[in-house]
Image (tube, rainbow, N blue to C red):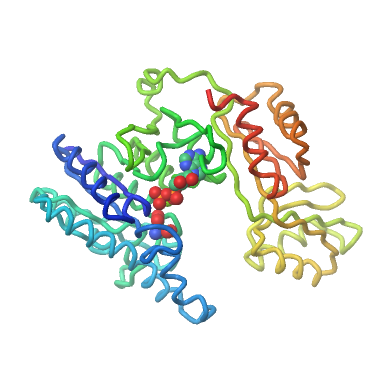
């Protein structure tokens, strides 16, 4: 029996109406004779009753009082509520279904609570239920340690649960259902004329996901790529087939993909730029700075090292600590907070002259200062102030005609 994994995100499960649509997507695929494994996220977004952030708000006044093990127990509740609710809906519609926790589905992880890694998936239980003709509903985002403790896989981790289950079950495809029509050329919440991509390769999507396209988690893409399982990202709220992620050439050719240089633009906000000058502090500036950041577990990015010092970025929430650490070892760093990293991404830009010139042109036309930039063969990043981020995204999207 071919197996299909269908993952439904928070907005797809948050109301009675949307859950009816979920039911329709499951019924349609079931009629095609697939064995169906459904992976669910917690219902809704921040502020809605059973969303992960809402559960976390129950303990926010207590600082770090709750150990990470128990914090994972709290965070895992949202997915359990979704799985049981959907299971009841399926059974009520005369579709036999069973709900399994991550542990019940055999998702064994290490014990890094809050960011657990999957060690193994023991599929016997899922397979048995599938053979009995049931739809198997599995809680996303969670696993269990060998010792029996519930773990979570990191925020946005239900996508990872879905592709990992797809890989373990040798699924024909993993469908990620969300609230937009696929992976778009930019976040449609900011760029109104962003357009869904029809077919894209894993590497490009993984890159977009890492650089802020939060429609899919990069780990999920990596797992699917390793297992060579296609992913479809599509909307629960339409019949549109969305975006197919695959490296299979036949699919890619048949989709009349334009020979594009740039595939999409992405953003990450909440960033602080830190500049450290060598003459301000001790010798070995680079060594001292980055060792100090590492010692304090401050994640650094966008690193430019010169003989005169170093410029790099940290998240805004780490900025005060980063500055204090640098001062404590004798530097006088300069920090510019509330910045955003805007990335222009495209497998086709490798070796093509003039891409950077067009980026600078687009931003200069809007009067947007570039604070820093860097590039690889498939990406050019620029750092701008957060207040310029939306205009920068729109200008770049238009400059590369991504709406066409
Ligand atoms: P879910 O709860 O279904 O997992 P997420 O909120 O994690 O949904 O991801 C969907 C959201 O990702 C969309 O509503 C959209 O605003 C955002 N997004 C950001 N970048 C992109 C992009 N390039 N393409 C599509 N959606 C994007
Ligand atoms: N509910 C979890 C989160 O909000 C996992 C997910 O939605 O993918 O991070
Ligand atoms: Mg998500």
In the image, is 48 to the left or to the right of 363? left
Quarter of the image where one finds residue 330 = bottom right
- Above/below status of 382 relative to 74: above
Residue 218, percent from left and from top: 47, 46
The quarter holding residue 116 reads bottom left
| Residue 322 image-quadrant placement | bottom right
Which residue, as the protein is rendered here, is positioned at the far right? Answer: 279
Q: 117 or 255: nearer the eye? A: 255
Position of residue 321 in the picture relative to residue 43 (left or right): right
Residue 260, compared with residue 340, is above or below; it is above
Depicted 391 relative to depicted 112: above or below: above
Is 247 rendered above or below residue 77? above
Name the residue located 70 percent from the left edge and 51 percent from the top edge: 339
Assign the N terminus to one quadrant of the image: top left
- Tally the numbered discs: 0
Residue 220's x, y, as percent? 41, 47
Residue 316 can be seen in this image: yes
Horizontal and vertical percent position of residue 404: 53, 22
Front in this rendered view, residue 10 or 314:
10
| Whole-percent x, y for residue 172 in the image | 25, 36
> Does residue 217 appear in this view?
no
- At horizontal 66% and vertical 51% (from top left) the residue drawn is 301
Residue under the point 42% across and 42% down:
221
- Left or right: where 395 falls relative to 107: right
- Could you say which is closer to the camera, residue 292 or residue 163? 163
């Amino acid at each position: 029996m071919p197996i299909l994994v269908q993952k439904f995100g928070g907005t797809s499960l948050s109301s009675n109406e949307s859950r009816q649509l979920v039911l329709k997507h499951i019924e349609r695929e079931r009629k095609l004779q697939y064995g169906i494994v459904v992976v669910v996220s917690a219902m809704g977004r921040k502020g809605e009753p059973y969303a992960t952030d809402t559960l976390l708000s129950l303990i926010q006044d207590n600082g770090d009082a709750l150990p990470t093990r128990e914090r994972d127990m709290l965070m895992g509740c949202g997915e359990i509520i979704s799985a049981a609710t959907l299971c009841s809906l399926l059974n009520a519609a005369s579709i036999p279904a069973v709900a399994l926790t991550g542990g019940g589905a055999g998702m064994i992880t290490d014990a890094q609570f809050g960011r657990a890694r999957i060690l193994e998936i023991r599929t016997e239980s899922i397979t048995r239920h599938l053979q009995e003709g049931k739809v198997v509903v599995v809680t996303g985002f969670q696993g269990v340690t060998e010792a029996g403790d519930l773990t979570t896989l990191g925020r946005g981790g239900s996508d990872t649960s879905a592709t990992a289950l797809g890989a373990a079950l040798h699924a024909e495809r993993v469908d990620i259902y969300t609230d937009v029509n696929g992976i778009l050329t930019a976040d449609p919440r900011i760029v109104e004329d962003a357009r869904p991509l029809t077919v894209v390769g894993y590497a490009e999507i993984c890159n977009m996901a890492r650089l802020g396209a939060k429609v899919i988690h990069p780990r999920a893409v990596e797992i699917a790529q390793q297992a060579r399982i296609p992913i479809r990202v599509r909307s629960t709220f339409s019949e549109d087939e969305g975006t197919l992620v695959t490296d299979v050439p036949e699919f890619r050719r048949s989709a009349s993909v334009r020979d594009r240089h740039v595939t999409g633009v992405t953003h990450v906000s909440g960033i602080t730029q830190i500049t450290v000058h060598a003459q301000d502090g001790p010798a070995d500036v680079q060594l001292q700075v980055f060792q100090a950041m590492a010692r304090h577990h401050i994640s650094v990015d966008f690193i430019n090292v010169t003989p005169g010092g170093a410029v790099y970025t940290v998240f805004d929430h780490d900025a005060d600590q980063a500055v204090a650490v640098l001062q404590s070892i004798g530097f006088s760093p300069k920090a510019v907070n509330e910045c955003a990293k805007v990335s222009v991404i495209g497998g086709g830009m490798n070796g093509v002259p003039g891409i950077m010139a067009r980026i600078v042109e687009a931003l200069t036309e809007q009067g947007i200062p570039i604070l820093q930039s860097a590039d690889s063969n498939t990406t050019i990043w620029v750092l701008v102030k957060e207040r310029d981020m939306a205009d920068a995204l729109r200008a770049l999207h238009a400059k590369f005609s991504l709406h066409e």
